[in-house]
Image (tube, rainbow, N blue to C red):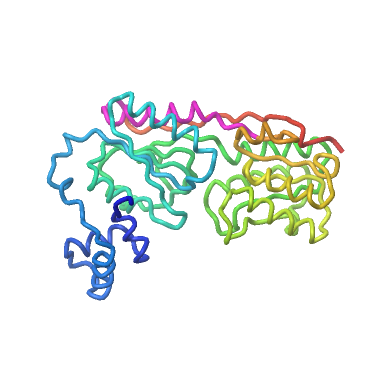
């Protein structure tokens, strides 16, 4: 059985790892009630704080952590493999830490920094909207990879690597419009989402507007909260509801390939065909989109280039060879069998 971590304790208590750390260290900035609750959970689960790391000099450590939101997303599989291989090639230790969708990745990173004496951090996936003061609590170099950023961020305060999700989403919806489609549905993140899902939705809207088409609210289909985000199961459930609603549409843009595969399954089960009855397009360029039948039109993200550039920037920062930098890679429109002209 794997040993329990401070992050596990935080999840059990419904608090951040910083709060758990304060309770363990008898910090005054925590209520007695919260501290008692945390210490009770610690005792019940036989958690032993790792104090040894705090007593060692950081200079002795050569560890890089990758914190990932959406670890079940197959898009990240190849990137994680490349991160691990390259980090180990450079004689550094590699740590992969999952961050839950509603968990504060900065708090997780701060605690990992203390526990593992990190030299650098890669934040992978999700959305960043933390305050400057919060970011300044991190004392090691970090790079944001494939992450949506709040517009108020000062680019001189962080480094990033990604595609332009707005631009690439626009590109694929523009392509659907060029095939004659006028009723284009979208499977997207919930409207209160601020991540890459929103950027892809905004690209969808702009492409429709530039073709003189009104955005039809009945064709905006948000992922279901109770199902895993960006999953085939979610795409299937959302598309099934759309089909049963009777709303007319001729094309469907899913903001991830996994959603698109699920959507195709729902269409086939309804007795319809892809692309004969409905064109379907995805985003990411996953292998499954190519090997699925019909193969799915998508935007391919250059995974290898993104991963390599992320680590190049991170190690340049670690070695003080540069200040912050940003790299945006172009995506590639892969036209396949799931879309057709009408």
Residue positioned 33% across, 35% down in the render: 94
Residue 22 percent coordinates (x, y): 22, 62
Above or below: residue 26 compared with residue 204: below
Position of the C terminus, as image quadrant, is top right
Relative side of 249 to 326, left or right? right
Magenta-span inclusion, residue 311 = yes
Tell me the magenta residue range: 299-322
Relative side of 139 to 297, left or right? left
The furthest residue to the front: 1
The one of 11 and 107 positioned closer to us in this rendering: 11
Q: Hey, which quadrant is residue 4 in on the image?
A: bottom left
Residue positioned 41% across, 50% down in the render: 99
Residue 325 percent coordinates (x, y): 39, 31
- Magenta: main secondary structure equals helix
Above or below: residue 103 compared with residue 89: below
Residue 191 percent coordinates (x, y): 60, 58
Relative side of 43 to 79, left or right? left
One can see residue 151 in this view: no
Q: Hey, which quadrant is residue 290 in on the image?
A: top right
Residue positioned 63% across, 39% down in the render: 283
Residue positioned 76% across, 36% down in the render: 338
Residue 314 percent coordinates (x, y): 34, 31
Task: Report the number of discs.
Answer: 0
One can see residue 128 in this view: yes
Magenta-span inclusion, residue 28 = no
The one of 245 and 48 positioned closer to us in this rendering: 48
Q: Hey, which quadrant is residue 45 in on the image?
A: bottom left
């Amino acid at each position: 059985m794997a040993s329990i971590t401070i992050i596990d304790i935080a999840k059990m208590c419904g608090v951040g790892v910083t709060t758990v750390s304060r309770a363990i260290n008898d910090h005054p900035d925590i209520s007695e009630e919260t501290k008692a609750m945390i210490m009770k959970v610690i005792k019940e689960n036989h958690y032993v704080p790792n104090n040894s790391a705090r007593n060692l000099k950081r200079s002795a450590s050569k560890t890089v952590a990758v914190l990932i939101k959406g670890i079940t997303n197959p898009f990240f599989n190849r990137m994680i493999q490349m991160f691990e291989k390259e980090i180990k090639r450079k004689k550094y230790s590699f740590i992969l830490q999952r961050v839950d969708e509603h968990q504060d990745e900065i708090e997780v990173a701060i605690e990992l920094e203390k526990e593992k004496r990190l030299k650098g951090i890669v934040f992978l996936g999700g959305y960043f909207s933390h305050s400057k003061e919060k970011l300044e609590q991190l004392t090691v170099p970090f790079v944001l990879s494939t992450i949506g950023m709040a517009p108020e961020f000062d680019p001189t305060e962080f480094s990033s690597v990604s595609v332009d999700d707005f631009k690439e989403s626009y590109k694929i919806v523009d392509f659907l419009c060029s095939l004659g489609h006028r009723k284009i549905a979208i499977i997207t993140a919930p409207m209160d989402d601020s991540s890459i899902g929103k950027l892809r939705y905004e690209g969808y809207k702009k492409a429709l507007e530039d073709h003189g088409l009104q955005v039809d609210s009945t064709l905006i289909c948000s992922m279901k909260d109770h199902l895993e985000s960006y999953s085939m199961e979610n795409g299937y459930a959302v598309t099934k509801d759309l089909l049963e609603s009777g709303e007319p549409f001729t094309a469907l843009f899913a903001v991830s390939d996994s959603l698109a595969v699920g959507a195709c399954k729902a269409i086939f089960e309804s007795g319809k065909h892809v692309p004969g009855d409905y064109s379907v397009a995805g985003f990411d360029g996953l292998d499954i989109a190519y090997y699925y039948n019909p193969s799915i039109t998508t935007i391919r993200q250059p995974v290898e280039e993104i991963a390599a550039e992320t680590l190049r920037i991170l190690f340049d920062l670690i070695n003080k060879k540069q200040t912050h930098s940003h790299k945006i890679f172009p995506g590639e429109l892969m036209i396949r069998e799931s879309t057709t002209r009408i």
